[in-house]
Amino acid sequence: MVAREAILLTALIFILVLSQPVGPPAVVFAQRAVGGAGVRERAEAAFDAKRYAEAAEAYKQLFTLDSTDERAAYRLGRCYNVLKQYADAVSPLKDAIRLDPTDVAALDELGDAYRNLRLLDDALATYRAAVQCLVTFDERANLAAIKVPVLCLAAEHDGNAPPAVLEKMAAKIPGARYVCLPGLGHMPNLEAPQAFDAAIFNFLNAALAPKG
């Protein structure tokens, strides 16, 4: 039975490779499909048995095979935190949050990593200072003195930086461009990264284009 499964698996890999127009991507896809399942079983078993060093190596391999595997990223960070390798935990936990900004467990784990690295207090102090600047900073009188290309990029449903405010700001800056992204809120770079990037690159291409 094992030999038959091995033959079928080899045939599947062969079909996957031949069905792709270019060799390397097909090989990578086959490796992910075939290798990932066994690695995941090993990772989950080690994690459940609290063999965190072994689990970390397996989850690291899983995330290498598939950089969109949010579960592997989170659990890799979790393993590192348990092993008190806090500096190593930061990067995979950031990846997990990037892949799923609603992952509260990953946010908590990242907070623990920073706290144990004694960086959280500094980060909170910096954030408080930034908030203080937001409510006291007022340079409206100097907008007209800006002499460089400026993009005032708003989002239709952003209540923190309303489009009307950005539009007025653009009107006071010589040559500024105002763009409003429809249907988006305060985090357009996460809500619609392609639309956000397009607005940025369109502005940069126009600003850096040869004059005359």
Image (spheres, grey):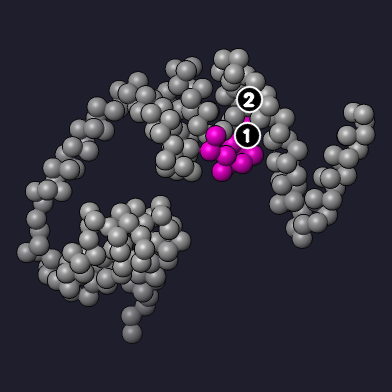
Residue at image point 22% right, 38% down: 127
Q: Amino acid at mark 1?
A: Leu
Disc count in the image?
Answer: 2
Viewer-proximal residue among 84 and 1: 1
Image coordinates of residue 59 in percent, x first then y, are 59, 29
Instruction: Give the class, few, some or many, for how many residues have Cα within 10 Å of label 1's Cα (few <14, many ≥20).
Output: many
Q: Is residue 90 visible?
A: no
Picture quarter with the C terminus: bottom left
Say above or below: 53 vs 61: above
Residue at image point 35% right, 69% down: 203
Give the SS element for disc 2: helix
Report the residue marked by disc 2. 43
Q: Amino acid at mark 2?
A: Ala
Q: Residue furthest left?
A: 141
Residue at image point 35% right, 66% down: 181
Q: Which residues are magenta?
A: 61-71
Report the residue marked by disc 1. 62
Distance, label 2 to label 1, CA atoms, is 9 Å
Image coordinates of residue 92 in percent, x first then y, are 49, 34
Residue at image point 49% right, 17% down: 83
